[in-house]
Image (cartoon, grey):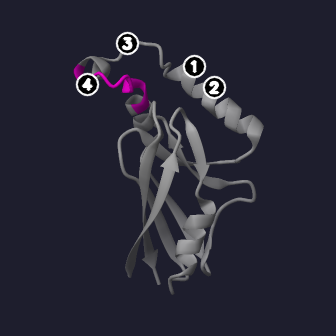
């Protein structure tokens, strides 16, 4: 059985990190699927999905890491092509990835105690985002 759900978000951009664990669990709970896997997929090419401990110090470290690894102030060819100034956000999102597979048992996401599912919006402006959730199992 495959069930598809959608979660709508408003993001701020600039490495905005949004904890979507509760909405994903809520969507899962509304199904009759007890054991399986949930695929979490963010549409768009300037945001990604991962898990993290949603703790302020770690969130700051995570945001600072992106600036060290893929700085905003470099020249990106994408910016020359489109003039949007968000080339860095495309590169960051590509590295993080657009999807995440999360197993679940007895209707509960199999996450660690300090592990949350987050959307990271790297774009240089606010966005309306859609998270596609596919629940597969029995």
The residue that appears at 36% across and 25% down in the rendered structure is 87
The residue that appears at 37% across and 12% down in the rendered structure is 75
State which mark lies toward you, 3 or 4.
4
As drawn, the label of residue 64 is 2
Q: Residues within 10 Å of mark 4 (few under 14, many from 20)?
A: few
Give the image location of residue 58, x and y in percent: 72, 37
Residue beneath disc 3: 75
Which badge, 1 or 3, comes first in the chain's sequence?
Answer: 1
Q: Residues within 10 Å of mark 1 (few under 14, many from 20)?
A: few
State which mark lies toward you, 4 or 1.
4
User: Which residues are drawn in magenta?
Assistant: 81-89
Which badge, 3 or 4, comes first in the chain's sequence?
Answer: 3
> Does residue 97 show up magenta in the picture?
no
For the residues marked 1 and 2, what is the alpha-carbon distance in whole angstroms? 6 Å
Mark 2 and mark 1 in contact (Cβ < 8 Å)?
yes
SS type, badge 1: helix
Query: Quick one: quadrant of the N terminus?
Result: bottom left
The residue that appears at 25% across and 25% down in the rendered structure is 82
Residue beneath disc 4: 82
As drawn, the label of residue 68 is 1
Q: Nearer the viewer, residue 100 or 128?
A: 128
Which badge, 4 or 1, comes first in the chain's sequence?
Answer: 1
Give the image location of residue 29, x and y in percent: 57, 79
SS type, badge 2: helix
SS type, badge 3: loop
Q: Nearer the viewer, residue 80 or 92?
A: 80
């Amino acid at each position: 059985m495959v069930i598809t759900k959608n979660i709508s978000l408003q993001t701020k951009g600039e490495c905005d990190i949004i904890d979507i664990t509760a909405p994903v669990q809520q969507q899962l709970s509304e199904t009759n699927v007890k054991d399986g896997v949930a695929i979490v997929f963010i549409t768009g090419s300037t945001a990604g999905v991962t898990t993290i401990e949603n703790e302020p110090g770690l969130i700051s470290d995570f945001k600072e890491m992106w600036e060290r690894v893929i700085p905003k102030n470099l020249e990106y060819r994408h910016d020359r092509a489109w003039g949007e100034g968000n080339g860095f956000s495309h590169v960051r999102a590509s590295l993080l990835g657009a999807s995440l597979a999360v197993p679940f048992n007895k209707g509960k996401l199999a996450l660690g105690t300090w592990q949350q599912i987050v959307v990271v919006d790297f774009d240089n402006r606010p966005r309306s985002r859609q998270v596609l959730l596919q629940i597969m199992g029995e």
